[in-house]
Image (tube, grey):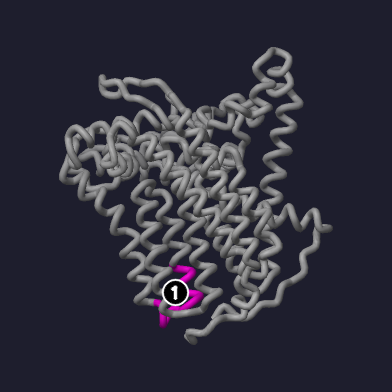
Amino acid sequence: MMASKSNYARIAPIRNLSETFLYWAIAVFVVKLLIIFNIQGGNIEISGRPFFLDGVWLGADGENYLKGYDALSREGLFSKEEMLNYWPAGYPLVILFLSLLGKSLALTTLSIVQSFIFSYAVYFFATELSKTKLKKFAFLVFLMILFNPTLSLASIVVGYESLLASGLLICVGFVIRSFVTKNDKKFFKYMIVSSAIFGFLSFVQPRIILTGLFINLVWILVYKSVKGGAFLMALSVTITILLPATLIYRNNQAVGIKSISNNLGSTMNIGAGDNATGGYMLKDFGVPCNPTGTVSEKDIQVITCVVNWYLENPKKTLKLFYYKTIFFWSPWINNGFAGDVFTGTMYRNPWLNISPLNNIAKNEDGANLIFGTFGKVFSWLWLAGGLALLFYGYFILWRQNSLERFIGNLAMVAVSTNWVITLFTIGDHRFRVPIMGLSLFLQAIGLKTLFKGGKAPIIDGPSLR
């Protein structure tokens, strides 16, 4: 491939636009620093010891991650703590690494690092987007992602969601940059970095590995073709799985389990069976199964039982898929709009503490409004409207040529793979946080096009190759 500048380089953003993104990203980061240093969360008891929560809020699985971190800090890398085998140990290991700067500041450092990465990711993605023929959408995309309260505040929470959302934006940004510059040496560097980032994200939360492999392999295939990209695809896969593989080594050394975690079967089982609701359940869930053998063998057997149940019960499967989809895309406030069975895990969403709707619901009349007929109708409209904007934005990009269409395809790959994983596990709106940056990107495309009359001209661009 020629190592020359592409036609996209001629439409590089006006410098002031890139600088505007940078100033806003820095401003939001500074505001978050003020919030972080003013959070005095008291303390909780972890493994019989007080744990101070200054500078951070707990996420849905916050206690479990802190329990894992505490075990690692006391017992070392090969701690036998059960939580480190049941849940992936990657995120507790991240906290452990940050504690090297000072154990008393580990959680404050975590919030600062996650917030910095988020601000940089939004800035980087928007800047790269503005170098394409979608630059007229870049500012709205930037604002909608940076100022989304749930996504933005997630960076001050003990939870992997913010890191995954930020990493996805950065990796897609590298894809865009590679097609703008069309320089083979730089493409190789971007591919290596992107693969390493997806490896880290998979280390933190393995469910993202499918998204990472799809994005990078499709990117290499389009940029290099099958013949020219075979080696690079193999290299990308190797780099991506390398870091998550270290968790298998850790678990094997610690307790003899040859897997990243042993909760996949349990998670899938909660979301399946005759009594399943599609969401989290504490009892009366699952499919008939009598696993035997080691912990890893039992997990695989449960997965097999669940898959077989889906195949044998197509009508019940479709019904559960429907509910899991509703739960995945549902509003943050649970008002029972999809049925009284739904219980999401975003009850610790920091946005809910200041959300006007949540404040209205604190008195009886407000609660009747928010959780009554009006609230349910509004929730359905919000859900349907959000999905309509997402698909409309994708349709607009699909009508474009070359790079702009490809960006839309990558965003939809990220959204759809996480959506599909939810269908086979548990429906929960928390699982959509990692893909919110890219789903908001598609919604912003749809929203601006809608306000411009609903028609987007087809943008002629040069070939991707």
- The extreme right residue here reads 453
- Please identify the quarter of the rendering in which residue 65 is found: top left
Residue 76: percent from left, percent from top: 18, 38
The answer to which of 125 and 411 lies nearer the viewer is 125
Q: Does 118 sit left or right of 61 as displayed?
A: right
Residue 326, x across and y down, in percent: 61, 39
Q: How many marks?
A: 1
* Image point (56%, 44%), residue name: 28
The stretch in magenta equals 217-229
Q: Which class describes the residues within 10 Å of circle 1: few (<14), some (14-19), or many (20+)?
A: many
Residue under the point 19% across and 32% down: 74
The residue wearing badge 1 is 187
Q: Main secondary structure of the magenta part?
A: helix
Q: Is residue 61 above or below residue 213?
A: above
Image coords of residue 299 (percent x, y): 30, 41
Q: Quadrant of residue 191?
A: bottom left
Determine whether 394 is above or below 35 in the image: below
Q: Quadrant of residue 50?
A: top left
Res. 299 visible in picture? no
Q: Is residue 107 visible?
A: yes
Magenta stretch encompasses residue 218: yes
Does the magenta-highlighted stretch encompass residue 32? no
Q: Is the C terminus in the top left, top right, bottom left or bottom right quadrant?
A: bottom right
Q: Residue furthest top?
A: 364
Front residue of this view, candidates 431 and 32: 32
Left-right relation of 35 to 254: right
Q: Disc 1 marks which amino acid?
A: Phe
Q: Which residue ends up furthest to the bottom in the rendered image?
A: 2
Q: Could you say where residue 382 lies in the image, as x and y percent from the top left? A: 70, 39
Q: Residue at x 66, y 74 (%)?
A: 401
